[in-house]
Image (cartoon, coloured by chain):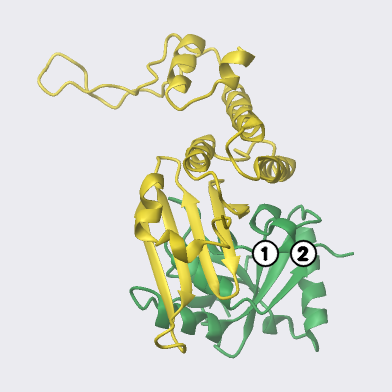
């Protein structure tokens, strides 16, 4: 439900634009906020989709993206575990940052949409920490 | 015009702006602290009365970006200049492909990166990506070591450096900070970067 914290055992997908993943290799810039603007880093809650496999989840996410915006052939999907991400940021950041992943479905739109909160703009260290725990990398566009 | 743009330097850009937009003060609006007769209310946008549109400004910025990339490609002192220029063109083109109205690459960040490349001419080719605000982000990676630099549009950098902790291998050393491009390697010992950030020899 909207506002629920996503459990640490669950997984999220982050859409990475082609210039954040040159040559298909995801960079820390995929986990940065825009200056002055963003409060949350948009992600998708994979377990919400209730698929039986990771492949099924990725297909669902690709379809969501294709319906929501134009997906370049070089865009990627980064898959992370919520608990791993929160742990590394809490233990390794300078201020022991406690980031939260909150379910934030889009009305009449993407119901798996969620947000990573308590990030700050220009926080390169945390972006690099998150990159360190990316588990999987998939194309963002359906074949 | 093209020859002037090709000789692009951060100081020159204001001279070009003045000649293109004679009614605009390229140095920003100046406030007088002790002249009560001067209207110090919030000034109107400098572009309100200009006959030029935002599209024209974007086109000028695109030219500036491409000119800087051209300078890198033609440089005799920057190592991997061809590869760097190709990577930058690729980034510029793919951002423009997705959104033609986007910056593509922030010209001020690219200018900062260009100055950096001219200071340190023996660099291994970094992985280049763009921040959400289209600033240059350069990363060098080797085994468990990372050195990443975010080239800020107002000059200066934010950097991140991770490396193994030889004394306590279960922990990593993690360093982050802010500094000018010419002091980056006063903070991180250059000898520890040879072979993966700097070319050997």
User: What residue sits right under mark 2 in the picture?
Assistant: A140
Q: Label 1's element?
A: strand
In screen coordinates, is A127 left or right of A140?
A: left
Q: Colour of chain A?
A: green
Q: Residue at x 31, y 22 (%)?
A: B29
Marking on residue A15 = 1
Q: Label 2's element?
A: loop
In screen coordinates, is B110 left or right of B173?
A: right
Q: Nearer the viewer, residue B80 or B46?
A: B80
In screen coordinates, is B126 left or right of A57?
A: left
Q: Quadrant of the C terminus of chain B?
A: bottom right
Q: Is residue B131 visible?
A: no
Q: Nearer the viewer, residue B85 or B135?
A: B85
Vertically, is A85 above or below B84? below
Q: Nearer the viewer, residue A24 or A99?
A: A24
Give how far across and how far down residue B147 sits, in percent: 50, 62
* Labels in figure, total: 2
**Callout 2: chain:** A
In screen coordinates, is B98 left or right of B118?
A: right
Q: Nearer the viewer, residue B65 or B86?
A: B86
Q: Residue at x 44, y 85 (%)?
A: B171
Disc 2: CA contacts within 10 A as few (<14), some (14-19) or many (>=20) = many
Vertically, is A40 above or below B53? below
**Callout 1: chain:** A
Gap in Å between the C-alphas at discs 2 and 1?
A: 7 Å
Give how far across and how far down residue B71 sits, in percent: 61, 30
In contact (CB < 8 Å): disc 2 and disc 1: yes
Give how far across and how far down residue A51 sits, in percent: 78, 85
Residue A108 occupies quadrant: bottom right
The chain drawn yellow is chain what?
B
């Amino acid at each position: 439900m909207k506002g629920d914290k996503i459990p640490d055992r669950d997984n999220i997908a982050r859409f990475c634009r082609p210039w954040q993943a040159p040559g298909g290799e995801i960079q820390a810039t995929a986990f940065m906020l825009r200056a002055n603007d963003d409060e949350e880093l948009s992600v998708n809650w994979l377990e919400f989709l209730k698929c039986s496999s990771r492949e099924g989840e990725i297909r669902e996410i690709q379809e969501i993206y294709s319906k929501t915006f134009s997906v370049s052939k070089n865009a990627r999907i980064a898959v992370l575990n919520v608990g791993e991400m929160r742990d590394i940021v809490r233990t390794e950041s300078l201020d022991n940052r406690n980031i939260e992943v909150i379910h934030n479905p889009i009305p009449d739109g993407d119901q798996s949409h969620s947000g990573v909160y308590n990030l700050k703009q220009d926080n390169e260290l945390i972006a690099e920490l998150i990159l360190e725990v990316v588990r999987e990398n998939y194309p963002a566009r359906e074949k | 015009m093209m020859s002037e743009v090709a000789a692009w330097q951060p100081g020159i850009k204001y001279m070009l702006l003045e000649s293109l937009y004679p009614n605009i003060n390229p140095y920003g609006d100046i406030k007088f602290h002790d002249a009560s007769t001067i209207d110090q209310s919030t000034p109107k946008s400098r572009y309100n009365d200009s006959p030029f549109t935002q599209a024209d400004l974007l086109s000028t910025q695109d030219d500036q970006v491409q000119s800087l990339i051209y300078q890198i490609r033609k440089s005799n002192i920057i190592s991997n200049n061809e590869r760097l220029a190709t990577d930058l063109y690729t980034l510029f083109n793919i951002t423009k492909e997705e959104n033609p109205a986007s910056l593509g690459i922030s010209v001020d960040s690219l200018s900062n990166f260009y100055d950096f490349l001219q200071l340190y001419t023996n660099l291994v080719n970094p992985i280049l990506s763009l921040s959400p605000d289209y600033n240059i982000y350069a990363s060098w990676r080797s085994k468990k070591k990372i050195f990443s630099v975010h080239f800020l549009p107002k000059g200066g950098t934010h950097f991140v450096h991770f490396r193994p902790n030889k004394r306590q291998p279960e922990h990593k050393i993690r360093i982050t900070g802010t500094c000018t491009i010419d002091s980056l390697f006063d903070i991180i010992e250059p000898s520890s970067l040879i072979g993966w950030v700097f070319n050997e020899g």
